[in-house]
Image (spheres, grey):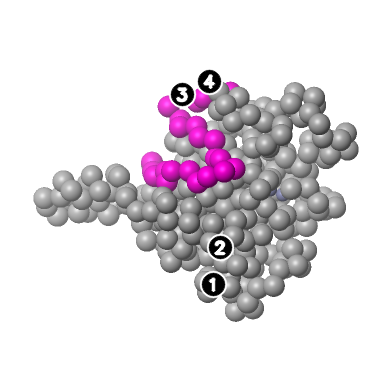
Amino acid sequence: MIFTCGKKYISNNSGGEVVIKTRYFAAMSLYLASINSGSNGNCYYVGTETDAVLIDAGLSCRETEKRMARIGLKMSAVRAVFISHEHGDHIKGLESIATKYPIPIYITPPTLSKGKLRLPLEALRTFAANDAIAIAGMTITPFAKMHDAIDPHSFVIERNGVRVGVITDIGVACAEVAVHFAQCHAAVLEANYDEQMLENGRYPHHLKNRIRSGHGHVSNAQALELFVRRRHPHLSHLLLAHLSADNNNPELALNMFTAVAGKIKIVVASRYEESAVYHITGPAVAAPPKIKPAKPRVVQATLF
Ligand SMILES: [Zn+2]
Ligand SMILES: [Zn+2]
């Protein structure tokens, strides 16, 4: 992988002080890429110079490897896979990845059971909302979200105060989502549908209502409100994620956010190809205050 900023420092290296700065600089950063985003498969990469975690495994192992290789990323750097919930677009590549690589898989027992996944026992790890997990210099904090799955979570990955959130499949920008998003330097944030396109679209009425029920997905407008109201001054990158193929338009979503983004880079995470690798850095930001999470209501889990 080419680490643009680190490389610049290293190539200018002519003394010990610069080396120290290089190490300090590298330690205050993370790398973020979307491998795919949408109802056809979700997989997000967050890592350091040497190690990484994947959030969700919605593409086959072969496709995940192929796309990662195109942007200079290697599966051999992946130290763990975290699963957000059991919907097929988040787990359908997991068995093939677990068959090929002995990577620890962090998944809660209800999600494992509901997903009917056959995984090597030795790979299985569990997690609980708000209990941070340390992996290779990163800290991964899961938190609960509203979505029509059995035990859904989003994640924040932190390294020395630099924070990246992976926040998709949220029925609503609940208090948990808001406090975590508010501390992020970068975020993968769901912007699933345009409200008018959903209303006027071909989906049956009951499906439209489930999507906008508060346990389905968030609209462009809901995500935009979170972005405008809660973004941190150090937020530098926003990847708009899980856009509906039927009820959204990438250009429309991009324009809505870009219009109010200032210097923040807005990217639509594609449902067809991997993104670039984004280097996320900035002054350390404190962890969010602990709040009492709302208990997500468990409903029938069929909505992707
Ligand atoms: Zn999904
Ligand atoms: Zn889902």
Which residue is nearer to you in this view: 62 or 171? 62
Q: Which residue is mark 1?
A: 100
When the figure is inspected, residue 50 is found, relative to residue 198, above or below; the finding is: below
Q: Secondary structure at mark 1?
A: helix
* Amino acid type assigned to the residue bearing label 4 in the image: Ala
* Amino acid type assigned to the residue bearing label 1 in the image: Lys
Q: Which residue is mark 3?
A: 262
Q: Secondary structure at mark 2?
A: helix
Of circles 3 and 2, which is in front?
A: 2
Q: Secondary structure at mark 3?
A: loop
Q: Secondary structure at mark 4?
A: loop
Q: Is residue 137 left or right of residue 229?
A: left
Image x and y of residue 54, in percent: 53, 58
Q: CA distance from mark 3 to mark 2?
A: 37 Å
- The answer to whether marks 1 and 2 mark residues whose Cβ atoms lie closer than 8 Å is yes
Of circles 3 and 1, which is in front?
A: 1
Q: CA distance from mark 4 to mark 3?
A: 8 Å
